[in-house]
Amino acid sequence: MNLSTRPDKSVGTDEGWELATQALVEALNNKGWDYIEDIGGGAFYGPKIDIKIKDAIGRTWQCSTIQVDFNLPERFDMEYVAADGSRQRPIMIHRAIFGSLERFYGILIENYAGDFPLWLAPIQIRLLPVSEAQREYGEAVAANLKQAGYRVEIDCSGERLGKQIRNAELEKIPVVAVVGKREVETQTLSIRTRKQGDIGTMNITELQDSLDKAIAFKANI
């Protein structure tokens, strides 16, 4: 966490810069966050809070920023009508949650080496039909899970079960559910996870309960 202050080349008044910088200091103190001061690291129009993230090999990248800008409203002569009917000058706040979205995703992918936790994984569950005969049940289960808000897909490759499981492991899918003849008859799923391997048979309700708890606690099953 960085407090980036006025650079050598800047616009605006000393008073405006002091007011903006103090506002950010108070915001950081109110949150109880430790920070370091990046002297001269602010934008030319205002100071900022920078959140810098280290990537998988220790490089530091600026991501989130919050900037207070008293200058541009002045330069554009911006006004608003306050509750008492008076005309007031607004304060502009520039806020970038991720910074460059592509850079943020790159850091995230490298950090996890593609092995995303359950809550974050693009595909959370993959259903593996043993044969075409189990496809209809698999599609019904997938529809149920999608309606509940999970990111789920069915392996439609037609490969043998062992190859489907291997592909899911290589693609780092957090949860796979085998759909065979027995599962169709008992209306269950045989569950296998990246972290624990084969964890046994569950019905859809039990699976959803496990997924909900894991996602709520940012954990895996």
Image: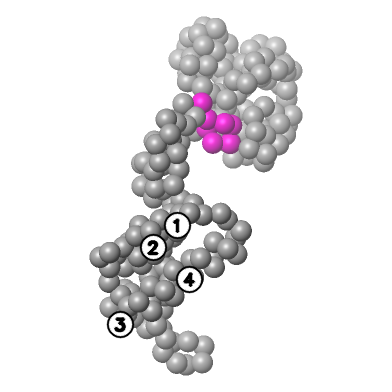
Numbered range of the magenta stretch: 115-121
Question: Badges 3 and 1: C-beta atoms under 8 Å apart?
Answer: no
Dot 3: element: loop
Q: Is residue 30 left or right of residue 159?
A: right
Tell me if residue 119 is in the magenta stretch.
yes
Q: Is residue 160 visible?
A: yes
Distance from disc 1 to disc 4, alpha carbons, whole Å, reads 13 Å
Q: Nearer the N terminus, badge 1 or badge 4?
A: 4
Kind of residue sitting beneath label 2? Thr
| Residue 16: image location, x then y, percent | 38, 77
The residue depicted at 48 percent of the width and 16 percent of the height is: 170
Distance from disc 3 to disc 1, alpha carbons, whole Å, reads 31 Å
Q: Nearer the viewer, mark 3 or mark 1?
A: 1
Kind of residue sitting beneath label 1? Glu
**Image disc number at residue 22:** 4
**Image disc number at residue 37:** 1
Question: Badges 1 and 2: C-beta atoms under 8 Å apart?
Answer: yes
Count how many numbered circles sit on residues in the image: 4
Name the quadrant of the C terminus: top right
Query: Where does label 2 land, which residue?
Result: 5
**Image disc number at residue 77:** 3
